[in-house]
Amino acid sequence: MNRLRNYRTDKTTRDKYAEVFISAEDFIYPYFIVPGSHQKQEIASLHKVYRFSVDELLLDLVETVNLGITKILLFGVIDETHKNEKASEAWTENNLISQTIRMIKKQFPNLTVITDVCLCGYTNHGHCGILNGDMIDNDETLPYLAKMALRHALAGADYVAPSAMMDNQVSAIKNILKENHLNTKILSYSAKYSSGFYGPFRDAANSSPSFGDRKTYQMDYRTILQAIEEVQADIDEGTDWIMVKPAHTYLDIIQKIKIKYPNFPLVAYQVSGEYMMIKAASEAGYMNEEIAMHEVITAIKRAGANYIISYYAKEFIRKSL
Ligand code: PBG
């Protein structure tokens, strides 16, 4: 008889056989930034996550850095009244995110700053690109994404992260960075599926489409092969890191991509709805948050992610089992 239970007799023994480990450096922690000062706004749809003005952000970063987190991802959140057809607040010279990067880099020069590059938080219709009639015009959108990325790069971003799912967005950004002699890296949201799990984020970032959905640009969840095509296209266009998003519900895709591109840094995004699913169920008393959170994040790493974007990053580190 095989005595497989000998692997599990006590915690020390179980620890000895563990194959998957997670450290603070594996995490990328997302932040929502608002203009102004003295703002630390609770987000109704995303418990324990806040929108920060830059002064409050700098205070919060002290704790984040002390926990050992080395990478953050920034999203800008602006008022409806400042949004327009061309998303000008996304790419104007002294935009919110560029200002924020400069302030962060003054105080935390070694923190890796990644910025989301997408128009959805800045267009008056909430779509990720420029509209032509009621269609999102791919090629018309590219120069705006490029300009937005350039602004972030000039302000000192380490990585720009295009999430608009426009074809050729990595090339457009790569070219403008090259023309400006910048060696800012690109983390592309390569295989980004159209997902019901983005709901809480859209409330947090005030970025819901005012009509229709994102199915003409984000991927259909019934597809597998397209994930490989999307990743390959981004690699061909010169991306530095690749991403699969969401994560919890796309472990199969993470694993396929890791097997096909074993040497490419792979990021997985545990998105807002995947976070809130655990958070809300735990708050309601239906499961133990600590155990569930560790289990899911370990699963994402076990599937093959090198880095994990998660709203749980801080809690995970604080409550390491
Ligand atoms: C912007 C963007 C979205 C998310 C990250 N970048 C929203 C969307 O595509 O609708 C979602 C992240 C999350 O749900 O946590 N395009």
Image (cartoon, grey):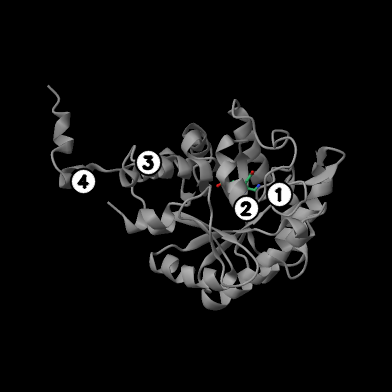
Residue, disc 2: 205
Q: Earlier in the sequence, mark 1 or mark 3?
A: 1
Q: Is mark 1 within 8 Å of ligand 1?
A: yes
Question: What amino acid is found at the position of numbered circle 1 in the picture?
Answer: Cys
Classify 160 as above or below 155. Answer: above
Which quarter of the rendered picture does the N terminus lie within? top left
Question: What amino acid is found at the position of numbered circle 3 in the picture?
Answer: Ala
Cα distance, mark 2 to mark 4? 42 Å
Q: Is residue 275 left or right of residue 1?
A: right
Label 1 element class:
loop
Q: In this rendering, does residue 271 appear at all?
A: no
Q: Earlier in the sequence, mark 2 or mark 1?
A: 1
Count the labels in the image: 4
Q: Are marks 3 and 4 in contact (CB under 8 Å)?
A: no
Q: Is residue 99 left or right of residue 301?
A: right
- Disc number placed over residue 284 in the picture, else none: 3
Residue, disc 1: 120
Q: Are marks 2 and 1 in contact (CB under 8 Å)?
A: yes
Residue, disc 4: 16
| Position of residue 282 measured from the top left corner of the image (x, y, whole percent) | 36, 42
Q: Are marks 1 and 3 in contact (CB under 8 Å)?
A: no
Label 3 crowd (10 A; few <14 / some 14-19 / many >=20): few
Q: Earlier in the sequence, mark 3 or mark 2?
A: 2
